[in-house]
Amino acid sequence: MNKIIILAVFCASIIVPPAVAGAPTALAIHGGAGTISRDKLTPDREQAIRAALDRALDAGHAVLDAGGPALDAVAAAVVVLEDSPYFNAGKGAVFNADGVNELDSAIMDGSTRRAGAIAGVHRVRNPVQLARAVMEQSPHVMLVGDGAEAFASSIGMPLVEPSYFRTEERWQQLQDAKARTSARVALPRSYYFGTVGAVALDASGHIAAATSTGGMTNKRWGRVGDAPIIGAGTWADAGCGVSATGWGEFFIRLNVAADICARVAYRGDTLADAAGSVVMKRVPELGGDGGVIAMDAQGNIAMPFNTSGMYRAWIRPDGSRGTAVYADP
Ligand code: ASP
């Protein structure tokens, strides 16, 4: 019996290396890419958005600082962004064409390749927590719609009224989007984007990624974007993690997040080259737009986007941190 216990402890220590005190950790988060114009983004709003990004960084980094797992760090950061009305995830999510908020999310643990995802839920306050519960408390990777909400209830996760997610601004965006669509006027990209995500490297050298979104304004009932699709909008493996934001259909067709990490793993590309080629070349060549945050096992961070802005923030292994909106600082 003792031998079995000793063997089990030995195996566990191989599979899950302990956090190494002082080992480099890093965290990157995003609050969506899109048309962010300097004249529309008032200084007050920009400050509020940057403050929310900072709070999310603090929440995630507190976990990493305490030697906690990257998985906890990305979940903590994404919850803060889901709770903020400024981003298209959780509270403040965009409306679909039927005037309903339909939320998608995914989370992935790079060291074990475990993953969880949910799509099309409209009563789950923090979709990333339900995605994580699917990963940890069910034998599945993805649950959708009513089934996902029934699962949430079955594990005691409280559901909120759908009205919880509503903000007047998003409602007006939907009205405007409908008017533009019937007048056949193109929608501004700012109506689509605002997804949130996080990628972290913990002191054990493990990477995790998470993404959460309301999708795209005026989307059809039942439409699912890239965010909850493992490999498209969210991916983590032993050497690389990615969370994406942008025009989901293109990110699905290019399997963006996994493609970036595959370039790092199989071609030996640097993270910057891999993320840059996919986001700045492959995505626009196909007609899509958006951006990613990506991280490798050394804590290098790449945050390319081919839109005018992407809300983003980071803490590098050397402890330096920042928030940014546009391409230039
Ligand atoms: N990628 C998301 C989607 O297509 C939208 C976004 O990033 O804002 O659902």
Image: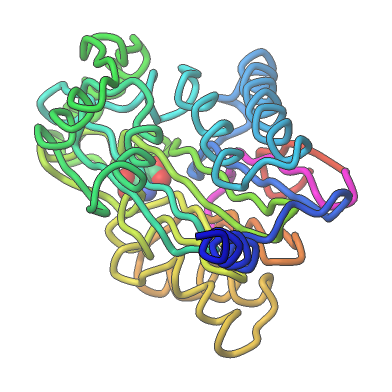
Residue, far front: 1
Give the residue drawn at x 70%, y 78%: 270
User: Could you tell me residue 157's position as x and y percent?
Assistant: 29, 21
Magenta span contains residue 318: yes
Q: Is residue 5 above or below residue 117?
A: below
Left or right of 263 on screen, residue 202: right
Q: Nearer the viewer, residue 241 or 72?
A: 72
Is 81 included in the stretch rendered in magenta?
Answer: no
Q: Quadrant of residue 251?
A: bottom left
Q: Quadrant of ligand 1?
A: top left
Looking at the rendering, which quadrant does residue 99 occupy? top left
Q: Is residue 38 above or below residue 232?
A: above
Q: Which residue is found at the position 31% from the left and 16% from the top?
A: 165
Residue at the spot x=68%, y=70% of the render?
A: 272
Query: Start and end of the magenta stretch?
Result: 306-319
Q: Residue furthest bottom?
A: 267
Q: Is residue 46 above or below residue 181?
A: above
Which residue occupies 40% across, 36% down?
128
Q: Nearer the viewer, residue 247 or 208?
A: 208
Q: Quadrant of residue 177?
A: top left
The C terminus lies in quadrant: top right
Residue toward you, 52 or 290: 52
Task: Give how far across and how far down residue 64 sits, in percent.
Answer: 72, 40
Where residue 168 sits: x, y (%)? Answer: 33, 9
Number of marks: 0
Horizontally, residue 212 falls left or right of residue 41, namely left
